[in-house]
């Protein structure tokens, strides 16, 4: 997706996904209390039906969705925004008039109310099996939970599948939705394993287990949740187990971000004297879930 594609995403849906809601909806436009100059007491930011915005409290500054994201997240560049949408760090779907953007930080207000096994809701199981190809529910149940959650400014409860990461954050996903409460990688260890496999997302990991179920207990697994977490794993994951070197295996995405992460993983493995294997040549498509679904 390029900048033109990003700017076609409806601004009100983007703002709703990061828990920003209009003070009022009018015929053809939405009015928000300015979140750029938050000391404003009433709505001063207008989003028009042509998907452009203007903030009257900020010298009539306005523009496209990308311009707005740059105002909300001043640490980002346009290239950063394009990269995040295309790498899944900002995850979105434009289906059924819905959109979901990854939460920037835990303080944005997602509250986990309870967790259950993945058999709790049939429609989530149907999404997992029929739309993501994770057909062995018994295997999936060992790694996923069903979460009941709520946004802090809402009284409505929601359900998603998900898992925890190393910082006790939650990676949640369902149809047309993906978010994380606190960014971190996820580890699944097996006693005596002499190899560690890296994946970018939990669905890639589960896809691996659908393709190679006999491999489940033979390796440790590290799910990055975003390639930006790769360097963090080097601080806490040893490349040795006892006197043995751990083999490092990469099943990262077949894209520019995956290329860079794979090269970094290769170099770090070499530094620690561990053998590294890039297994991306063993599958077609952007990632393992695409390969499982035949999307290539």
Image (cartoon, helix red, strand yellow):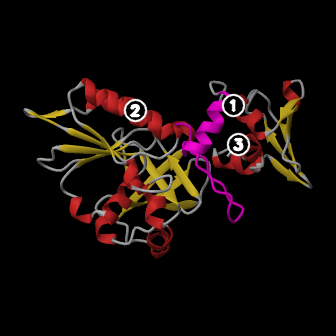
Mark 1 or 3: in front is 3
Task: Provide the secondary structure element on which disc 3 rests.
Answer: loop
Image quarter of residue 168:
top left
The one of 240 and 166 positioned closer to us in this rendering: 240
**Could you say where residue 256 lies in the image, as x and y percent from the top left?**
53, 38
State left or right for residue 289 relative to residue 234: right
| Cα distance in 3D space between marks 1 and 3 | 10 Å
Asked if residue 292 lies in the magenta stretch, the reply is no
State left or right for residue 74 relative to residue 118: right
State left or right for residue 275 relative to residue 50: left
- Where 254 falls versus 231 (above or below)? below
**Could you say where residue 59 lies in the image, as x and y percent from the top left?**
89, 24
Asked if residue 83 lies in the magenta stretch, the reply is yes
Task: Point out which mark residue 78 bears.
Answer: 1
| Cα distance in 3D space between marks 3 and 2 | 25 Å
**Could you say where residue 19 lies in the image, as x and y percent from the top left?**
64, 45
Mark 1–mark 3 contact, CB under 8 Å?
no
- Where 124 falls versus 185 (above or below)? below
What range is drawn magenta here? 77-105
Q: Which residue is mark 3?
A: 2
Does any portion of residue 161 appear in the rendered image? no
Residue at 46%, 37% in the rendered image: 259
Image quarter of residue 136:
bottom left
């Amino acid at each position: 997706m390029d900048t033109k594609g990003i700017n076609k995403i409806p601004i009100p849906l983007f703002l709703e996904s990061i828990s920003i809601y209009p003070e009022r909806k009018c015929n053809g436009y939405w009015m928000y209390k300015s979140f750029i100059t938050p000391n404003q007491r009433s709505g001063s930011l207008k989003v028009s039906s042509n998907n452009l915005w203007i903030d009257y409290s900020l010298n009539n500054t306005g523009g496209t969705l990308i311009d707005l994201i740059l105002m909300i997240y001043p640490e980002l560049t346009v290239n950063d925004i394009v990269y995040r949408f295309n790498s899944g760090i900002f995850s979105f779907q434009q289906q059924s008039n819905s959109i979901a953007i990854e939460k920037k930080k835990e303080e944005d207000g997602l509250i986990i109310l309870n967790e259950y096994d993945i058999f709790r809701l049939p429609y989530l199981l149907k999404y997992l099996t029929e739309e993501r190809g994770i057909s062995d529910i018994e295997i999936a149940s060992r790694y996923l939970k069903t979460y009941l959650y709520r946004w802090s400014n809402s009284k409505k409860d929601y359900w998603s599948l998900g898992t925890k990461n190393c910082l006790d954050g939650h990676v949640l996903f369902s149809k047309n939705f993906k978010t994380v409460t606190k960014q971190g990688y996820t580890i699944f260890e097996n006693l005596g394993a002499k190899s560690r496999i890296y994946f970018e997302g939990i669905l890639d990991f589960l896809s691996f287990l659908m393709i190679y179920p006999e491999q489940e207990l033979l390796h440790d697994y590290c799910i990055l949740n975003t390639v930006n977490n790769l360097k963090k794993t080097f601080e806490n994951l040893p490349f040795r187990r006892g006197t043995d070197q751990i083999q490092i295996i990469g099943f990262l995405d077949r894209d520019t971000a995956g290329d860079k992460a794979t090269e970094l993983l290769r170099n770090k493995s070499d530094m620690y004297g561990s053998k590294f294997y890039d297994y991306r040549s063993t599958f077609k498509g952007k990632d393992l879930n695409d390969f499982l679904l035949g999307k290539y």
